[in-house]
Image (cartoon, coloured by chain):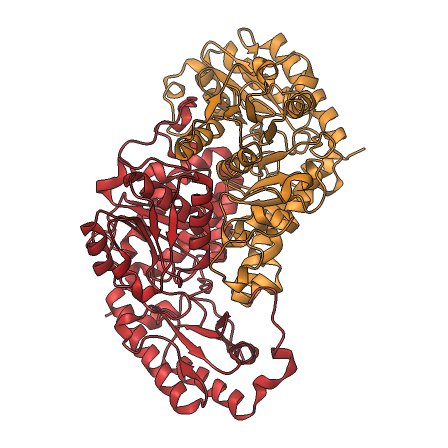
Chain colours: A red, B orange
């Protein structure tokens, strides 16, 4: 059984704060400053250009990729990290389309994270070859996987409601009709168990700044099924994915049958350093334990809110097996209530038009945090504190 | 007159090392560890998700972009930083092509950095609409700018020889025939004066880990001429470039008439922190002074090498006005000679097939460094030390 008091002790969370926003930006691992200083002093400062060899920088896309792979049920050598998630969407969808050259439909859903939809729209416009993006309601996705569909592009866990797609059913239906699936695991990796290899997923992508706690704007990752990798034609064909990057040839040749071909340009080693430090926390964690405890804490949170916070309603699926790692709530003025909570050091976030999100992970949240968070919400409601004018004005970045 | 003894004192370079590889990876500014610790402790750890507002993370793409803009002769509001240079090549060339919809030729040269050529090749293959990449000898570029050419994609300073293209002539010729130019300033920014606005450049891109000293894999930048920005259709259309990213609409709308539309996904704030620290060094630097001193030091280096190092030949343009910030040399075994130099703490690098590169910047290199570097080379040659077997085996990353 995973000891979550140990993982909790590995984070540096400000005194008195209940941080329920790890679904947006994870908190800082205690070792981060020391590891960063070591990178700066012993690696960049001391080794300088030689660090690409002597400190293994060149292969951190892969060594860190292998560590992320473990958390999504992928084998070593199938996942690399770098860039941003938006770039990974482009890369995965671009590669997926080339695998189904006769099909012109990309199927997503209208609850997908907007950037995924935007990237697909930009890609379609650029390619200018009659592609179409369909985005029905999430519940209608399965019925819309027809033989017209080339690529299914979905985020497993809905960023607003926390509702989870059934990966197994969707993959199996997509493969039945000859479609390829790209999974965005932004709200899955580190939140719930994922088994990309066991489910025979085609492509998976995600970020590491949410449940993986690698800091603001931390690197993204991409997984490609080994059975597909040598058919993948990289669209973003940078030198880092070349078979022989240091031969400086003038013609691109993707690294043969290797995930290396999904590498693009020279990655930030400072960002990798924080990811490496953050991944240490996962060494003793069993994802099944994490999931069980997430459900326990989430159910407690929902039950207490419903009992003690009049007017606040739960906005996600009732069955915890259908949810990811966060709980969505609604109120008559969700924005103001969230601001009042933040002022009382209960940190969640607001998503247009009316959703409050609370990320719940036993990695650094325990039962008494949950009870205390609900008490503070109860108090805000009882005193109408959320009506204060200061909570009504939206910040630039919400 | 810029006081380069002051900038030299702002770097932390290991004792005894003569670092002539700032053209590949700049050395660490002394303030970097402290600034990073401050970001980790006072920003990520303390502010957590609120840092996007309270610490200005969200707009660092632009605030740092404005600081880089100054170094390339661009106005505020025309440059943003993020991602890698390979991504910026894709973004710029993709946007440029859409401005000349009836033209099918991308013109580059065969001395361009391979990743630029690779990215163009991947883009052409993906678009699959009859585009052609032409890469003649660098000297033939001007003559090849014909009315067939839509986009001219060049690196101003050749990564091997240091040879500089004539930006003014090429831009003027390109505009004459209705072509758009994308300049890669990877080896220009911080090495030589650049005036993208004065020369009426269309697009410019570059990296910040070379002469700008922001650390391994530091962010790239992109400049778009203000007269073009509202025509630019972003190909990599991520949420960070949306007009209203926090409205979470399902349709992409680029930020109107603003460089913001060249932003893609959530950027690494750790990487930005190092860039911010590194840019402080430029506050007191006049780029004309820097260039004059670079020429002084380079001419001294070449003269001394030719006088004292038999068999070593200069491999760049004789006229210093035709060069960027590094000096290229050749020897009968350039690789082994460079390894022997590195072992004696004179750090340069080797580029296939036979080039030794020495980055020369007064920012942290002075006359006595140059003389000492040549003395060590002279000694290696006099004693045949480069013939030692340990210097013959190429490292994975050279």
Q: Return the x and y of residue B126 as percentages of the image width and height.
A: 40, 35
A127 and B372: which is toward the camera: A127
B172 left or right of A298 in image: right
Residue B299 in view (yes/no):
yes
Residue A286 in view (yes/no):
no
Q: Quadrant of the N terminus of chain A?
A: bottom left
Write down the quadrant of residue B295 in the picture: top right
Instruction: Identify the residue at the far right of this view.
Output: B1
Q: Return the x and y of residue A388 as percentages of the image width and height.
A: 63, 84
B374 vs B18: above or below? above
A283 and A173: which is toward the camera: A173
A349 and A266: which is toward the camera: A349
B118 left or right of A198 in image: right
Instruction: Identify the residue at the far bottom of this view.
Output: A382
Q: Return the x and y of residue A372 as percentages of the image width and height.
A: 44, 84
B179 vs A180: above or below? above
Which residue is painted at 49% across and 54% down in the image?
Answer: A217
A319 vs B328: above or below? below
A232 vs A290: above or below? above
B123 left or right of B300 in image: left
Which residue is painted at 68% across and 47% down in the image?
Answer: B77
Q: How many marks?
A: 0
Q: Quadrant of the C terminus of chain A?
A: bottom right
Q: Return the x and y of residue A92 as percentages of the image width and height.
A: 36, 45
């Amino acid at each position: 059984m995973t000891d979550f008091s140990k993982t909790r002790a590995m984070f540096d969370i400000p005194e008195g704060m209940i941080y329920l926003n790890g679904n947006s930006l994870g908190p800082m691992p205690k070792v981060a400053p020391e590891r960063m200083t070591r990178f700066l002093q012993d690696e960049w400062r001391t080794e300088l250009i030689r660090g690409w060899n002597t400190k293994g920088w060149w292969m951190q896309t892969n060594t860190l990729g292998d560590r992320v792979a473990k958390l999504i049920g992928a084998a070593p050598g199938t996942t690399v990290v770098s860039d941003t998630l938006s770039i990974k969407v482009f890369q995965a969808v671009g590669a997926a389309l080339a695998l189904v050259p006769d099909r012109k439909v990309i199927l997503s859903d209208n609850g997908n994270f907007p950037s995924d939809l935007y990237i697909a729209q930009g890609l379609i416009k650029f390619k200018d070859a009659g592609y179409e993006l369909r985005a029905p309601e999430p519940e209608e996705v399965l019925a819309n996987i027809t033989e017209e569909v080339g690529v299914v592009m979905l985020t497993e866990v809905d960023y607003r409601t926390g509702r989870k797609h059934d990966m197994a059913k969707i993959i199996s239906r997509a493969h039945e009709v000859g479609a390829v699936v790209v999974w965005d695991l932004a709200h899955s990796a580190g939140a719930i168990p994922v088994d990309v290899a066991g489910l025979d997923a085609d492509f998976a992508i995600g970020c590491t700044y949410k449940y993986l706690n690698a800091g603001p704007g931390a690197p993204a990752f991409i997984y490609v099924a080994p059975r597909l990798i040598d058919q993948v034609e990289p669209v973003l064909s940078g030198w880092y994915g070349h078979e022989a990057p240091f031969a400086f040839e003038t013609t691109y040749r993707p690294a043969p049958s290797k995930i290396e071909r999904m590498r693009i340009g020279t990655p930030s080693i400072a960002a990798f350093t924080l990811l490496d430090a953050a991944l240490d926390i996962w060494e003793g964690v069993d994802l099944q334990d994490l999931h069980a405890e997430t459900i326990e804490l989430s159910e407690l949170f929902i039950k207490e809110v419903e009992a003690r916070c009049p007017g606040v309603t739960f906005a996600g699926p009732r069955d915890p097996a259908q949810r990811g790692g966060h709980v969505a709530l609604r109120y008559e003025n969700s924005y103001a209530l969230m601001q009042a909570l933040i002022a009382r050091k209960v940190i969640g976030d607001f998503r247009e038009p009316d959703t409050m999100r609370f990320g719940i992970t036993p990695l650094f949240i325990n039962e008494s945090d949950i009870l205390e968070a609900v008490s503070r919400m109860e108090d805000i409601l009882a005193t109408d504190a959320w009506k204060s004018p200061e909570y009504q004005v939206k910040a630039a970045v919400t």
